[in-house]
Amino acid sequence: MFDDIIGKKSVPGTGSGTDDVLRKKYLSDPNFCPFCGFDTFTVDGDADLDMGNTVEIKVRCDDCGRRWTDVIELQGSEPVVINVIFE
Ligand SMILES: [Zn+2]
């Protein structure tokens, strides 16, 4: 039963399982950098609003400088991070 928590399953074709673990961790609590745990991010540029109710927002951690892209869906009036793309 702990397999889900540990997240040792990797998605085929996405390379190492490390990103998958980080992705699950980030999606469960998208308020912290998945790489270093810092809680302050800088948003690079504007959200792309041409994708209907799903927007992609580029984010950079203020501490470690790693970048990733939040994929956010508006569920009702609530923005929810539904996926994350690591660069
Ligand atoms: Zn960081």
Image (spheres, helix red, strand yellow):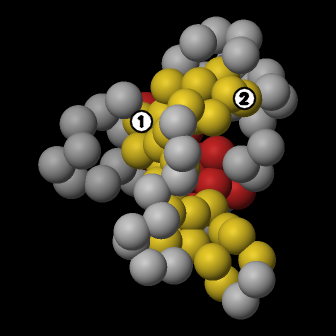
Foreground label between 2 and 1? 2
Graded by Cα atoms within 10 Å as few (under 14), some (14 to 19) or many (20 or more), the crowding at tag 1 reads: some
Graded by Cα atoms within 10 Å as few (under 14), some (14 to 19) or many (20 or more), the crowding at tag 2 reads: some
75 horizontally vs 31: left or right: left
Q: Residue at x 83, y 29 (%)?
A: 39
Marks 1 and 2: in contact by CB < 8 Å?
no
77 horizontally vs 19: left or right: right
Which secondary structure lies at badge 1? strand
Residue 70 image position (x, y, % from top left): 54, 49
Q: Is residue 5 visible?
A: no
Where does the C terminus fall, quadrant-wise? Answer: top left
Q: Residue furthest bottom?
A: 76
Q: Which residue is mark 2?
A: 41
Q: Residue at x 55, y 31 (%)?
A: 44
| Number of numbered discs on residues | 2
Give the vertical position of 75 relative to 21 (above or below).
Answer: below
Residue 56 image position (x, y, % from top left): 47, 55
Say what amino acid the circle numbered 2 marks. Answer: Phe
Q: Residue at x 80, y 27 (%)?
A: 40
Q: Is residue 30 visible?
A: yes
Label at residue 49: none
How far apart, in angstroms, are the residues tagged by discs 2 and 1?
A: 14 Å
Q: Which residue is mark 1?
A: 86
Residue 35 image position (x, y, % from top left): 61, 23
Say what amino acid the circle numbered 1 marks. Answer: Phe
Q: Residue at x 70, y 56 (%)?
A: 28
Q: Earlier in the sequence, mark 2 or mark 1?
A: 2
Q: Is mark 2 within 8 Å of ligand 1?
A: no
61 or 29: nearer the viewer: 61
